[in-house]
Amino acid sequence: MPQGKPNSVPEDGLTTRQRRNRPLLMVHTGEMKGKSSAAFGTALRGWNQGWSIGVFQFVKSAKWKVGEENAFRALGEVHEQTGQGGPVEWHKMGEGWSWARKQGTESDHAAAALEGWREITRRIGQQQHTLYVLDEFTYPLKWGWVDVHEVVSVLRDRPGHQYVVITGRDAPAELIEAADLVLRTEKVKHPMDAGQKGQRGIEW
């Protein structure tokens, strides 16, 4: 795909513009780091285009403050103050979904994950965001907290012009089959293999 050009053009009745602007379902899976980083890179480009960005983190602790969260919250403030870029919302399951106004606990993670998915489903139906980042959403699917078939159905039939990127290891086959873009990170070498802990600016 040199210079972003496809190797072949399907005979699907769509114009070049229609095909180029078709909203994508993207899945970033695999064992190596970089899945979320790539998703947030996409979100940065979307923000620059004025898209509404909705980030939903399904596994990370409420106490885990990642650099991307601080950066995107700041970008949301930039939009509110100057109109530059697009609006940003950031939600984490571990701190209690902000629309529920309650704290999450270890004992109700499954219920909280399903609650989060229900809210995302509602937002997709209302076309609330242009890009949804469902970070580490493969884990609730793998653990059976959220039904894979329902997720695939909702995402395949989403209305309007909404992009979705899902991150996490062990993405289910049904989700991979439904996706337009799938990347799989592969570990070749990692400092943690030599006993080195994560670093500021690299892991968070």
Image: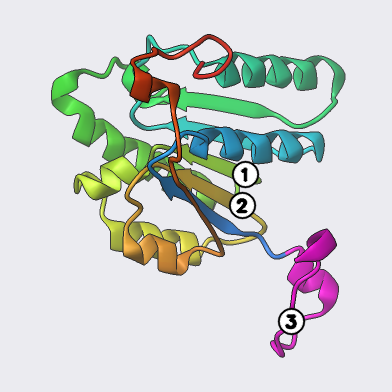
Is the residue 42 above or below the residue 194 in the image? below
Left-right relation of 174 to 26: left
Residue 148 among those drawn in magenta: no
Left-right relation of 200 to 3: left
The stretch in magenta equals 1-21
> How far apart are the alpha carbons under marks 1 and 2?
5 Å
The residue sitting at the left extreme is 107
Mark 1 Cα-neighbour bin, 10 Å: few <14, some 14–19, many ≥20: many
Left-right relation of 104 to 67: left
SS label for mark 1: strand
SS label for mark 3: loop
Disc 2 residue type (three-letter) = Tyr
Q: Which residue is mark 3?
A: 8
Residue 16 among those drawn in magenta: yes
> How far apart are the alpha carbons under marks 3 and 2?
23 Å
SS label for mark 2: strand
Q: Which mark is residue 131?
A: 1
Q: Which residue is mark 2?
A: 163
| Percent position of residue 63, x then y | 38, 9
Quarter of the picture containing the N terminus is bottom right
Q: Residue at x 66, y 36 (%)?
A: 41
Is the residue 131 above or below the residue 147 in the image? above
* Among the 4 quarters of the image, the one containing residue 39: top right
Q: Earlier in the sequence, mark 3 or mark 2?
A: 3
* Among the 4 quarters of the image, the one containing residue 13: bottom right
Foreground residue among 120 and 137: 137
Disc 1 residue type (three-letter) = Leu
| Percent position of residue 11, x then y | 72, 90
Q: Main secondary structure of the magenta part?
A: loop
| Percent position of residue 37, x then y | 57, 32
